[in-house]
Amino acid sequence: MLEMQILRDQKERVLEGFRKRGLSPERLGLVDQAIKLDDDRKEVQTQLDSLLNERNTLSDEIGNLFKQGKGAEANQLKAKVQEIKDNADTLEKRLQMIKTDLDAILVTLPNVPHISVPEGKTPEDNLVYKQSTEKLPDLPQGSMPHWDLAEKYNLIDFKLGVSITGSGFPLYRGFGARLQRALINYFLEQAREAGYEEILPPILVNAETAYGTGQLPDKEAQMYYVERDDLYLIPTAEVPVTNMYRNQIIPEASLPVKLTGYTPCFRREAGSYGSDVKGINRVHQFDKVEIVQIGHPSTSYEALQGMIDHVAHLMDSLELPYRILRLCGGDMGFTSALTYDFEVWAAGQQKWLEVSSVSNFETYQSNRMKMRYRDDKGKIQLVHTLNGSALALPRILVALLENNQTEDGIKLPKVLVPYTGFEWIRVKE
C-alpha cells in the first residue's frame, strides 16, 4: 500500500506513474480523494485531541475542587466533562469512518512504477533488457513438444492427473518426478551458496498474510480458498516468507535479510485456451523455489540487480537460451515498482515462455505489513522488499525436455547430473 506521505509530497510523480500503468481518469481522481480524506482525518484528529486535553484538564480540576470541599462547583464541571465526552465520542466515530474510507481507496491504488519502467500497455511493449549468448537449438527432424515427449518417455501422466484431481494438476512419475526433485535441490543449493537462508514455510496462509504481500484484495480470484478454515493456498513462497517479518523492527545491521524457500504453488487462473495451456505450459499446481530480500532503501536496486544476476546464472548453468524483459507499466504486477521477467526458449514449440519474475516492491508491501528498521538516528523507517522466482519448475522442465531432445533420447545438462543420478532419459527397452 502506498504511503500517504508519498501521495502528498510526490503527487505529480504518482499521477505520471499511474498514467504509465494505464489507469483511467476516474482512478487517477482517487489520489485527490485520498488527500482530501487525509486532510479531513487530520482536522478531526486535531479537534478530538483538543477535546481530550480539555477533558483531562477539567477532570484534574474536579478532583481538586472535591478535595477543597467545593462539591457544587465540581458537579457543574462534571456536567461539562460529560458534554465533552459525548462530543469526543461523535468525533471518534467520524474519525473511524474517514479512516475506513481512506483505506478503501488506498488498497485499490497500485505501486508507483520506477522511473526506468517503459511506457506501454501490453506484453508486446516490454523491452528486451538482455539476451543470453546460448544458441537456439537446432532440433533433429521429428522433434516434439514436451507433452508428446512426456508421453513417449513416461515422465508425466496428464490423464491420471485429471482423474485424480482435474485439469491443470499433472502427475509426474519415474524420471519426470526425479528430475523435478533434482531441480528443486539444485536451485535451493545455489540459493544457499549465494547467502540465502533456507525456509520451509506453511503453504496455507490467513487473510492478513495474503493482504500483506498484496495478494488480497487484488488477486483473490486467483487463489484457492479453504472456506471452513478461512485460509488460502499460497500462489508463491513469497507470501509466507516475506510475512515472517511482519510487524517487526529489524536491526539496521541485519539488513539485507536474504531468504529462500521451496513450496508447491497453487493458482486458480490457468490462462487462455490452446497451446498456451497445453501440457505444463500453464497449470494450477506447480513447484517453485523463491528468493526474497528485505533490504535497506538505499541499496534495494543493487539487491535487485544481484537477484537478476542470480537467476541468470541458473539459466546459464542449465545451458538454456533465455532473454530478460523489463516490463512496461501496463504489464507490471499491482504491487511492483520494477519487474524483470525471464523467458526461456522452448524449441519444440518455437516460442518464449516466462520462467521467472524478479521485482522490487520498495515500501509497498512493507507499509502493509508494518515491516521496519531503525536508522542510525533512531528513526523508524520502512524497509524495501524484493522477490524473484529462482526458479519456477514447469517451464524449465519444458525447455530441458524440448531443447535437449536427440535421436538417442533427452540429454540433461551436466550441472544436473549429480542431482538426478542420470544424464540421459531414454525409452526403456
Image: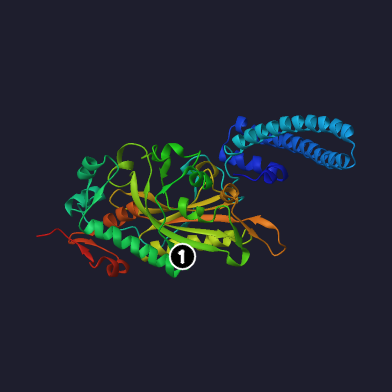
Relative to residue 51, is residue 4 drawn left or right?
left
Q: Residue furthest front?
A: 69
Q: Residue at x 61, y 37 (%)?
A: 103
Q: Nearer the viewer, residue 344 or 173?
A: 173
Pointer 1 residue: 197
Q: Quarter of the image containing the N terminus?
A: top right
Relative to residue 16, is residue 410 drawn left or right?
left
Measured from the top left, where is residue 369 in percent x and y? Answer: 57, 49
Q: Quadrant of residue 32?
A: top right
Measured from the top left, where is residue 249 in percent x and y? Answer: 61, 58
Q: Nearer the viewer, residue 120 or 82?
A: 82
Q: Quarter of the image containing the C terminus?
A: bottom left
Q: Nearer the viewer, residue 214 or 147?
A: 214
Relative to residue 392, is residue 291 drawn left or right?
right
Q: Nearer the viewer, residue 221 or 345?
A: 221
Measured from the top left, where is residue 85 in percent x and y? Answer: 76, 33
Q: Residue at x 46, y 68 (%)?
A: 194
Colour mode of the rendering:
rainbow
Q: Amino acid at mark 1?
A: Glu
Q: Is residue 282 visible?
A: no
